[in-house]
Image (spheres, rainbow, N blue to C red):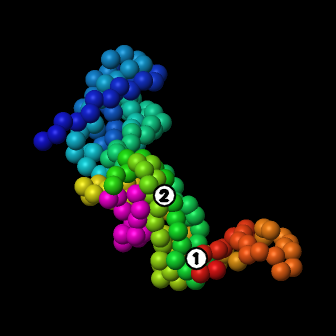
Amino acid sequence: NSPGVTVNLTGTGFLPGATVLLDGSGATATVNSRTSITAEIPASAMTTVRDIAVTVRNPDGAVSGAVTFSVVNGVSLTAVSPSQFRVGAGDTDVAASGSAFERGSVLELNVSGLSTEFVSATSLRAVVPANALRQAGRLIFRVRNPNNVLSNDVSGEVAAIPLQLSSISPANVNLNGPAFTLRATGSGFSRST
């Protein structure tokens, strides 16, 4: 049975007998002064990644504003880029950023693992398959580390993004000149564009 976590709450107007509430449920607490309370967040409240609203209720019924206590598991997903995809796009490369990624970490899309390349503890690369982009809707990304620890979720979207070409480079070449690489800039591109 793992221990809870002792936290120090600071504020003003705490009265003797004040109660600390964690998402509305009482917690073991000691009022130290009108500006300080020590409380314990029990291990049972920290079994999943989540935010806990911490409030103080004085004996007269007055309740403070909420402060957030976050339960994290180490691995964190900050962003997936791009996060918007065009309906009907082909396989699309994405970059995931965050922290505590490990060799063998997998970027998941709607709980299915994607073909993932470990770049560093803060970066992964993966491919979103075309079959996941067939219709408009919300996408949920997360990272699963080799020890099955999951990150938080990050949202993406499949939408009817128009294919748009904004520029090409080079914009002109010499007639019968050597081979060159044409770079196109715009939005709504995928591997098959």
- Kindly identify the residue that appears in the image at 39 percent across and 39 percent down: 69
Q: Position of residue 79 (x, y in %)?
A: 51, 55
- In the image, is residue 27 above or below residue 140? above
1 falls in the magenta region: no
| Quarter location, residue 87 | bottom right
Left/right of residue 68 with respect to residue 43 in the rendered view: right
Q: Residue furthest left?
A: 1
Q: Quadrant of residue 35?
A: top left
- Observer-nearest of 73 and 91: 91
Relative side of 10 to 145, left or right = right
Q: Mark 2 = which residue?
A: 96
- Distance of mark 2 from mark 1, alpha carbons? 18 Å
Asked if the stretch drawn in magenta spans residue 107, the answer is yes
- Circles 2 and 1: CB atoms closer than 8 Å: no
**Which residue type does callout 1 highlight?**
Arg
Image quadrant in which you'd find residue 81: bottom right
Report x, y in % for residue 110.
41, 70
The kind of secondary structure element at disc 2 is strand
Residue 186 seen by the camera: no
Residue shown at the point (84%, 70%) measured from the top left: 171
* Marking on residue 170: none
Closer to the eye: label 2 or 1: 1
Q: Is 185 or 51 nearer to us in this picture?
A: 185
**Magenta segment boundaries in residue numbering:** 104-118
Residue position marked by numbered label 1 in the rendering = 191
